[in-house]
Amino acid sequence: MTTIRAAHPADAAAIAGIYNHYVTHSTITFEEIEVTSAEIARRIDHVITAGLPWLVLEDRDEILGYAYATKWKERSAYRRSVESSIYLKPCAIGNGHARRLYARLLELLTQCGIHLVIGGVAQPNEASMALHQKMGFEPVGSFREVGFKFGSWLDVSYWQLRLGV
């Protein structure tokens, strides 16, 4: 049975393992060098210290995925807008886990007083666009050729969801 819980810095190695798969094998993240467990632990602490959620999806003590939100920008007027991120182990894709994890993240963001959630989707990524659409996000624009990875220029589309707070 899968459960969703708050992440802890002790989860960093498992999270790094999930994330680094995408760093080295895909263009859905624009990082190009694998991230250490220590860096992931620092990022978890940074998100939690900012009063935002970082969640993990577990099945029998194995972390299958994670989702979190970060400040959209540092200026004070942006304080109620965040950018969301979600990653699953490849073996966990297609089982509804992403929807459950994202739904819980959105619920907690609402409780935190967040008004707007922004999702950036590196293109092409039909699965992520479909997930954002299912979660109620609407497309609001894109940046063309904003990233360069694996010898190709990459676009990023942006989606937003108003939480009504």
Image (tube, rainbow, N blue to C red):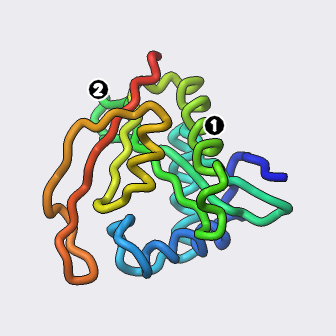
- Report whether 60 appears left or right of 134: right
Q: Is residue 21 above or below residue 3?
A: below
The label shown at residue 77 is 2
Q: Is residue 97 above or below residue 71?
A: below
Disc on the earlier residue, 2 or 1: 2
Residue 21 percent location from the top left of the image = 51, 76
Q: Residue at x 60, y 57 (%)?
A: 94
- Report whether 112 appears left or right of 56: left
Camera-side residue: 129 or 165? Answer: 129
Camera-side residue: 122 or 53? Answer: 122
Q: Residue at x 27, y 82 (%)?
A: 150
- Name the image quarter holding residue 127: bottom left
Q: Secondary structure at mark 1?
A: helix
Is there any visible trace of residue 75 in the rendered image? yes
Q: Is residue 96 above or below residue 36?
A: above
| Residue matched to label 1 | 104
Camera-side residue: 136 or 61? Answer: 136
Spatial CA span between label 2 and label 1 = 25 Å
Q: Type of residue at label 1? A: Arg
